[in-house]
Image (spheres, helix red, strand yellow):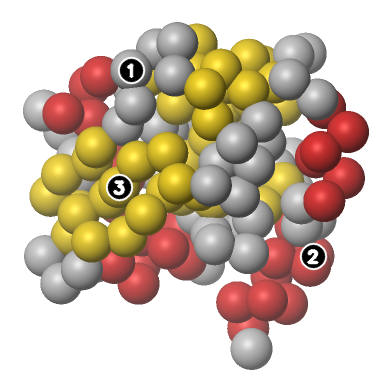
Amino acid sequence: MEVPDDLLYTEQHEWLRIDGTTGTVGITDYAQEELTDVVFVELPQPGAVVSQGKPFGTVEAIKAVSDLYSPVDGTVSEVNAALTENPEWVNEDPYGKGWMVRIAIKDKTQAKRLLSPNAYHKLVEQ
């Protein structure tokens, strides 16, 4: 299981990569392994307002449908539309081409509530 050191994590298994005032969001390697084969991703439209800890979309796999939770408050600035045709990218490259949305972050201090890579690793080991 891969847990990159340059990301922050939610207890619901989303990751956040902060670049200035933009956050890129996806699901973790652990989450995609648990879901197995992702067959559909439902994402919000650009301009949608998201709230920390609240659902913003869903991931459908062969065995389950799971909500996606926003790691921070903000506005969706970009959606990975390629996942419509290539949902398997979530399994193949969850931290790269399997990213889901980019968010214009409203309050960067909210990131302090997220898990560090070490804390996330401990969470999934339990």
* Point 79% across, 67% down: residue: 119
The quarter holding residue 37 reads bottom left
Q: Which element carries disc 1, helix, strand or loop?
A: loop
CA distance for labels 3 and 1: 13 Å
Residue named by callout 1: 45
Q: Earlier in the sequence, mark 2 or mark 3?
A: 3
Q: Which residue is mark 3?
A: 58
Is residue 126 depicted above or below 79 in this figure? below
Is label 3 in contact with label 1 (beta carbons under 8 Å)?
no
Q: Nearer the observer, disc 2 or disc 3? A: 3
Amino acid under disc 2 = Asn
Asked if 58 appears above or below 42 in the picture, the reply is: below
Q: Nearer the viewer, mark 2 or mark 1?
A: 1
Alpha-carbon neighbours of circle 1 within 10 Å: few (<14), some, or many (≥20)? some
Q: Residue at x 45, y 10 (%)?
A: 47
Q: Disc 2 versus disc 1: distance between alpha carbons?
A: 33 Å
Residue 1 percent location from the top left of the image: 52, 67
- Secondary structure state at the residue bearing disc 2: helix
In this rendering, does residue 105 appear at all? yes
